[in-house]
Amino acid sequence: MARIVQKYGGTSVRDVDRIKEVAKRIKQTRDQGNQVVVVVSARSGVTNQLIATAKSIVAQPNERELDMLLAIGEQETIALTAMALQALGVPAVSRTGAQAGIMTDLVHTKAKIKNIDASLIEKDLARGDVVIVAGFQGMNEEGSTTTLGRGGSDLTAIALAYALKADNCEILTDVDGVYTADPRVVPGARKLAEISYEEMLELASLGSKVMQSRSVEFASKYNVNFEVRSSFNNNPGTIVKEESASMEKVVVRGVAVDKDQAKVTVSGIPDKPGTAARIFKTLAASHVVVDMIVQNIGRNGVANLTFTVPRDDSARAEKTVAAILEDIGGGNVSVIANIAKLSVVGVGMRTHSGVAASVFQTLADHNINIDLISTSEIKISIVIELDKADEAARAVHKEFGLG
Ligand code: ADP
Ligand code: ASP
Ligand code: MG
């Protein structure tokens, strides 16, 4: 008997018909003699609607209350999925994050999982029940509901697979697996049979929303193999696992586009030790995650600093920095929102050169201007104009013969 964790995303449970289909699939897995723990997301669009409702009352809702509100999306689907299973004669029990023993830190809207007490789920399984757990949520030590960041049901599934020592973890979604680029943007994109944690993590952090990046980080840290596959068919998906020697033969594994970034420029700041430290410390204190950072060479004692942040955090970033400018000796802060980040990723870049040159040439051929550049061992990221992002992704994808 194997123990399987399955996660169904928002599109997979978008309405009652889909929930019934999902229940059939879960039943099949259980009928094969497996213990099954299922994580479900909210129906597609529900989390966005809840956020919009909250913002119609107040522009920046209290984050504790926002978490309380967002958690109901998943609470609806766990109960409906359990009912659909029971209707098929399968014993099933639904559990919220707290009832599943998922304990988090105190941060709201992007809490980290601290530990999972799986004892209640173990009892359910021992009784023969299928357990349906609400994704994306947990409880902190003050007894408050927390959420794990957008796309956080992936993290719930992977963390549960680890805590329950599951034999398999399947992330069931609305595409057949992880592709060389978002198949909705790049029609020629190809499904990958396997991908390393590191590449998946880069793709996810760089905008491929097929997996939440924090969930991949967790999987990599605890070596939880998982498969991304479709809930709409039985095609084999993509296995995400430790890097193997053969993976290095491929130079570029995939292309990602992130359209949810904004660029913050802090200009005219004193060119002296400690300035950048002050700015990024204050940003960290207000939980703004900063990505690409570029500082120009100081002239006449002043410097400019440019960095990218998630667009949703850009107003907060601007306000946070503005508040300390006087203190650090002057400067201005401004936000430019219509940018996108294009990235190419592959572990083979460690051993192959010339990738950057090819990317730059391809963009030049399409008359696309390069704004910021950052690189790591296995990726190159470029900030370009938002309107050009899809064209750039298709061109670069073609250049590297990805599909
Ligand atoms: P779920 O609701 O199941 O969590 P998501 O919408 O979060 O699903 O993620 C699946 C979507 O990710 C796909 O519909 C696809 O458009 C998008 N996507 C972006 N990049 C990729 C990629 N490289 N491979 C596959 N899908 C991708
Ligand atoms: N419902 C949450 C979201 O939309 C979590 C998830 O779908 O994974 O972000
Ligand atoms: Mg998702």
Image: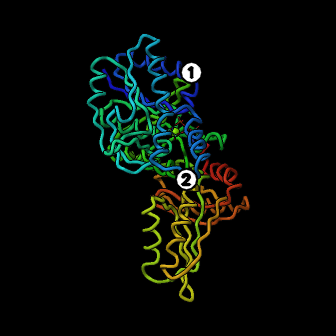
Q: Quadrant of ligand 1?
A: top right
Q: Which residue is mark 2?
A: 60
Amino acid type, label 2: Gln
Q: Residue at x 57, y 86 (%)?
A: 299
Q: Quadrant of residue 311?
A: bottom right
Q: Nearer the viewer, mark 1 or mark 2?
A: 2
Q: Residue furthest bottom?
A: 300
Q: Which residue is mark 1?
A: 16
Q: Residue at x 55, y 38 (%)?
A: 47
Q: Is residue 327 above or below residue 223?
A: below
Label 1 secondary element: helix
Picture colour scheme: rainbow
- Percent position of residue 301, x then y: 53, 87
Label 2 secondary element: loop
Do we see residue 351 in this rendering? no
Q: Residue at x 57, y 31 (%)?
A: 11
Q: Is residue 291 above or below residue 97?
A: below
Amino acid type, label 1: Val
| Earlier residue among tags 1 and 2 | 1
> Residue 383 or 181: which is nearer the viewer?
383
